Image (cartoon, grey):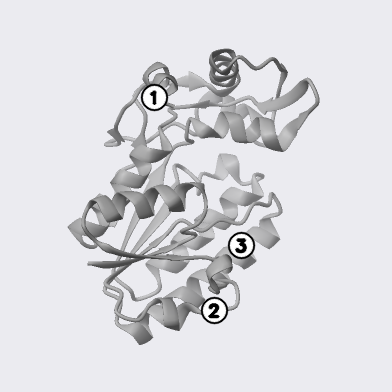
Amino acid sequence: MQIVVLGGTGQMGKLVVEQAKIGGHDVVAAARSTGVDISTGAGLDEAFVGADVVIDVSDHVTNSAKKAIEFFETAAKNIAAAEARAGVKHHVLLSIVNCDDPQLKSFGYYQGKAAQERAVEASGIPFTILPSTQWFEFGEKTIALFGLGPVAMVPRMRSQPIAAKTVAEALVTCAQNGPTGRAPDLAGPEVLEIPAMTREILKYRGRRKWLIPISMPGAGKAMKGGALLPGPGSTTAGPTLKTWLHEN
């Protein structure tokens, strides 16, 4: 197949492109750096020429609900319109487990992802939505975003983290299997406290940081209590954190 990966130059996008190529598919990595802007629609028509499947792993980091909803809704509509013009038969979206949970409504980014899901479902394009738990890589990303010298703040949350590569493999499998609507939640094999996971990663890397666990305003209790854990009927896939560290 010919697969277009939106956000194809980012952390997840690069992994999806790699896995799609391993699967023998023709792949187009679409991003702002390649002339594609999903927020305006620029470059989408050109990128979708001949495409069978679009895998959307694009991102927009903000905790403003207004900004997140506006971005993801607008982008989803621009993408769907271009897919319809190009005759794309399958849209695969990477989402987040429980992003529509009312307990997490104060987390603006999640509201944006929930709005994105709804826009994809209403688009008229056959779709698969794959909700994933946080990735192991989330620990190091948090330190990069919220670290200051020897100190870093880490959100208090319980999750069932998964390797980003495993998610990329699942997204390509979704593309190959055809539209299925909402796929089961995808999670790793272990329930972990994110601060403890991050400490383990830093210890393995030989890095020293003083980690300060913090509660997310309005959603801290829910996140620590397990609102980010996968739902019934979820799919679990390795590796474990220990194996992932040895492999990375």
Amino acid of disc 3 = Ile
Disc 3 target residue? 69
Instruction: Pick whichever of labels 3 and 2 is earlier in the sequence.
Output: 2
Amino acid of disc 2 = Gly
User: Where's the C terminus, which quadrant?
Assistant: top left
**Percent position of residue 209, x then y:** 71, 17
Residue in the image at 37% along x and 86% along y: 85
**Percent position of residue 10, x then y:** 52, 52
Q: Decide: few, some or many residues near mark 3? Use Cα within 10 Å; few <14, some 14-19, many ≥20.
A: many
Residue in the image at 53% along x and 61% along y: 115
For the question of whether residue 45 can be seen, the reply is: yes
What is the CA distance from the residue labelled 3 to the residue labelled 1? Answer: 36 Å
Disc 2 target residue? 41
Query: Furthest-right residue in view?
Result: 149
Disc 1 target residue? 247
Question: Which quadrant of the figure has residue 167?
Answer: top left
Q: Comparing marks 2 and 1, which lies closer to the viewer?
A: 1
Secondary structure category for the residue under label 3: helix
96 relative to 195, above or below: below
